[in-house]
Amino acid sequence: MSKDRGKDTYDLVMSLLSLSEIQRRILISLAHIYPRAASGTQLITLIGYSGKAKSLYRGPLERLETEELILVDRLTPRLHSIRVNHLHPLIGYLLELIQAHGKKTMELYIQALEEGTSVDRSE
């Protein structure tokens, strides 16, 4: 990222705004559990998605993967490991922001992942 953090922040916000709500929830959730990864089922639970994993892969995850914002490791035909692409400049900056200012929220996401629950975004 450039030394101009104001521009970096603007670029990150604009990039997030270009995503659908479900894509933002996926990206924010994965960024808060980084360096961990999540399976499709874990991700559905974590973000409180009411659909099936298959529909998640065919839509929101496909776009995020195409734009290289996430990495999807296909472990078996039905089991995928999904994580943020920490090498992407905007994702790298998002991870920096979370490390600096989002430790408590990060703990909530990790706890929810481990317990198999969703994160209540109303807090």
Image (spheres, grey):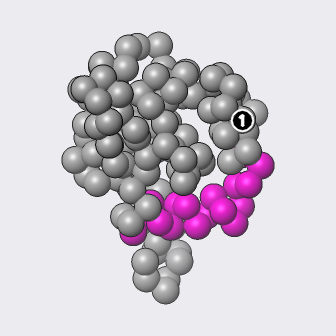
Q: Please identify the quadrant where the N terminus is shown.
A: bottom left
Residue 99 in sight from this viewpoint: yes
Q: Please state which of residues 101 and 116 is positioned toward the viewer in this rendering.
A: 116
Main SS of the magenta part reads helix
Residue 121, percent from left and from top: 66, 31
Q: Which residue is mark 1?
A: 111
The residue shown at (53%, 77%) is 5
Residue span colored magenta: 89-105
The residue shown at (32%, 36%) is 75
Relative height, residue 93 to residue 49 (above, below)? below
Residue 101, percent from left and from top: 71, 61
Q: Please state which of residues 105 and 116 is positioned toward the viewer in this rendering.
A: 116
Q: Please identify the quadrant where the C terminus is shown.
A: top right
- Whether the magenta-drawn stretch holds residue 97 is answered as yes
Residue 57 in sight from this viewpoint: no
- State the SS at label 1: helix
Relative height, residue 23 to residue 53 (above, below)? below
Residue 82, percent from left and from top: 40, 40
Would residue 75 appear left or right of 27 to someone viewing this image? left
Report the label total. 1
- Identity of the amino acid at label 1? Gln
Residue 54, percent from left and from top: 30, 19
